[in-house]
Image (cartoon, helix red, strand yellow):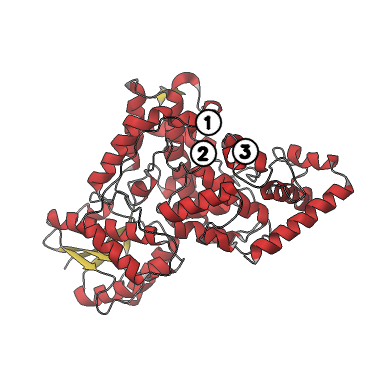
Amino acid sequence: MRSLVIVLGDQLDATSSAFDDFDPGRDLVWMAEVREESTHVWSSRIRIALFLAAMRHHAVALRSMGRRVDYVRLGDAGNAGSLAGELRRALARWKPARVLMTAPGDWRVLKALRSAASSAGYAIEVRDDRHFFCTVREFSALAEGSRSLRMEPFYRQMRRRRDVLMNGDEPVGDRWNFDAENQRPFPPGGPGFLPERLRVEPDDLTREVLTLVEREFPDHPGTLSDFDWPVTREQALLALDRFITDRLPEFGQWQDAMWPETPWLWHAQLSAAMNLKLLGAREVVARAEQAWRDGHAPLASVEGFIRQVLGWREYVRGVYWTRMPTLASGNALGAEGTLPGFYWTGETEMACLADALRQTLRLGYAHHIQRLMVTGLFALLLGVRPDRVHAWYLAVYVDAVEWVELPNTLGMSQFADGGQMTSKPYVASGKYIERMSSGRHCARCPYRPDLRTGPDACPFTTLYWDFLLRHRSRFSTHPRLGAQVRHLEHLSDTEVQAVRGQARQLRERCFTS
């Protein structure tokens, strides 16, 4: 055998760089289901099922293309339980001349595979992942010499370099950013008509996986009763078509809005398929841009969507691979609390938090404002240790692969890197949630977002003021957060002590829940 080609669960692209010179007569694809990838964090059943179902369908597709596949299933006799252990077994079994792969999305996995290969006398050839617009080397060159490369200048460079939404060297519409149009709450009547999302009925192969996950991971969080995610390239393309046609035109203005018990709204729901590599970032961006050029979607919506893919998604990947492994241990604000137990059950009186948590556990999904400004915000204000927040996000969301999840959680959500990614912590009181949910979450909640102390005070609001008090010296002269900190000057000593006392009681309850 000439080549053993490693294909991981988030590399389900038959045209990836690992196959550039693939010879069906001399090369072999190696894929493995192992328990460790579901237990190194307490992965939800829906996340486990998505990865395994997509992997099994991809193996079928590769074989239909005439490629030989050595596929190890979870229940196979002798399964070593880890990717490293299974790779060692595969190398002993096949004795290839070389081992190669496309760059993975997890630093831990790359380290383990390299160590396993080295112990067997191999060096893995790691090829660039063409799924992305920007290589890690390009990102490193852009960031060189600066303490922090912010997303906005990076995004503009990507637009120019890839000629996306450009008119020569200037952005179409003469603006780079349409956030002012893209941050609206819903009107009092709510989102109104919402187009139906694509629901994929599980086929026999997927149902086999669902049965396996129920049997092998019965104590893991979440449920499989609503499993309907795309698990093949063809299904993912249908989901892309549905988004471009039905939801992209309204996506922009409502992308930050929330509404109780309404999970999908106008969002794309494509990140899972993209992170599994069932969809390519280039084709997704091209389809969105073409929708604007065809007059199907307004520029503000298209720019807002492309900003998430070409801008933020590419940016966090660069941050991850240029700052690991130190990025994972960041804790700039010194948070040491435990994650409240209700993050795994959704059982809390806070209506906005309960809605986001229950939805997450049932569907494996929440949109970016629910993640950043509800679940993430509460953990930040409460003072949960960032690596515990990271482990939860990696465990529960179907689109969670570490290269994208860890920087988003530790850098953007928890400010654990001290401001290398974002210029300020994303902190707000319950009033923000009231505004972005048009008051509907708060109307269903026993707490009032305008109160910071007392039995009816919103925990978000209490903890927000306590956060400012705890970090007053750090942020008092901050160019963006300083104005919020200066509001503390209007609090009397009695009010300060009341806020601190109530926040302390909240922590005691949450950390022991």
Real-space Cα separation, disc 2 to disc 3, in angstroms: 10 Å
* In-front residue for pair 503/38: 503
Q: Earlier in the sequence, mark 2 or mark 3?
A: 2
Are the two marked residues, 1 and 2, in contact with CB atoms closer than 8 angstroms? yes
Look at label 2 and name its amino acid.
Trp
- On the rendered structure, is 7 left or right of 254? left
Q: Earlier in the sequence, mark 1 or mark 3?
A: 1
Local crowd size for mark 3, using a 10 Å CA cut-off: few (<14), some (14–19), many (≥20) = many
Question: Residue 435, image x and y in percent?
Answer: 61, 35
Q: Earlier in the sequence, mark 1 or mark 2?
A: 1
- Look at mark 1 in the image and give the residue it sits on: 186
* In-front residue for pair 219/253: 219
Real-space Cα separation, disc 1 to disc 2, in angstroms: 8 Å
Look at label 1 and name its amino acid.
Phe
Which circle marks residue 434 in the picture? 3
Are the two marked residues, 2 and 3, in contact with CB atoms closer than 8 angstroms? no
- Look at mark 2 in the image and give the residue it sits on: 259
Question: Residue 286, image x and y in percent?
Answer: 33, 33
- On the rendered structure, is 119 left or right of 360? left
Real-space Cα separation, disc 1 to disc 3, in angstroms: 11 Å
Question: Residue 28, image x and y in percent?
Answer: 18, 64
